[in-house]
Each structure stands twice: as structure tokens, then as C-alpha cells.
Image (cartoon, rainbow, N blue to C red):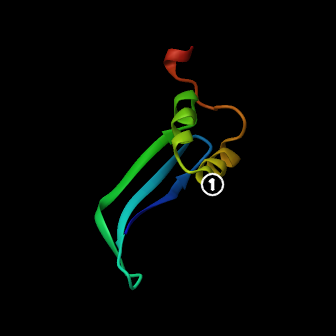
């Protein structure tokens, strides 16, 4: 069986970094990592807030608990 693990590795008011890892799990419970770690950063702006909605609900809730109700970064295209 292959499982994917996501973890918040860095979270501030302005951004978040998500670590994604894939593992092969053998019948005895032994996990073997498949490939390299993959990190994605999201910024606390309208685009980043929209993009994080693709993550699992528990991760989104943790991020939004830190970020609050509204974005705190304004893109230059939004001004």
C-alpha cells in the first residue's frame, strides 16, 4: 500500500511550507519512502488561500487558525 503524508514544516502570519512524502507500507507495517521529499510554499494572499483549499481539512484549519480571517499580503496586481 502507498500512503502520502503531509506536514506543516513552517507557519507564520505571511506563509506556510508543506512537506509531502510518499511511503510504501509493507504488510508488517514497515514504511519505505518513495522518492524525495517535496515542499510547497503558500503565501497568505488571495491566491495562496485559494490554493491551500486542496489540502486536507485538518491542515487547512491549522493554517487558517494562524492566518486569521483575511489575507495580510496584497499582491501588486491587486492594488
The image position of residue 22, as x and y in percent, is 36, 62
Q: Is residue 19 above or below residue 55?
A: below
Residue underneath mark 1: 58
Name the one closer to the observer, 41 or 61: 61
Q: Give the total of numbered labels.
A: 1
Quadrant of image for the C terminus: top right
Q: Secondary structure at mark 1?
A: helix
- Image height of 28 relative to 66, above or below: below
For this orientation, the residue located farthest to the left is 35
Report which quarter residue 74 is drawn in.
top right
Residue toward you, 33 or 43: 33
Extreme residue in the bottom direction:
28
Asked if 2 appears above or below 38 in the picture, the reply is below
Residue placed at 38% from the left, 81% from the top?
27
The answer to whether residue 26 is above or below residue 78 is below
Q: Position of residue 29 (x, y in %)?
A: 41, 82
Quadrant, the N terminus:
bottom left
Q: Residue furthest right?
A: 69
Q: Position of residue 42 (x, y in %)?
A: 49, 40
Q: Is residue 53 left or right of residue 67?
A: left
Q: Closer to the camera, 8 or 60?
A: 60
Q: Quadrant of residue 58?
A: bottom right
Q: Picture coordinates of residue 16 (x, y %)? A: 53, 47
Q: How packed is label 1: few (under 14 Cα within 10 Å), some, or many (20 or more)?
A: few
Amino acid at each position: 500500500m502507498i500512503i502520502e503524508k503531509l506536514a506543516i514544516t513552517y507557519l507564520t502570519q505571511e506563509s506556510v511550507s508543506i512537506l509531502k512524502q510518499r511511503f510504501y507500507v509493507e504488510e508488517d507495517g514497515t514504511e519505505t519512502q518513495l522518492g524525495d521529499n517535496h515542499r510547497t510554499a503558500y503565501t497568505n494572499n488571495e491566491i495562496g488561500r485559494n490554493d491551500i483549499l486542496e489540502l486536507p481539512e485538518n491542515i487547512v484549519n491549522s493554517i487558517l487558525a494562524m492566518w486569521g480571517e483575511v489575507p495580510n499580503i496584497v499582491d501588486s496586481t491587486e492594488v
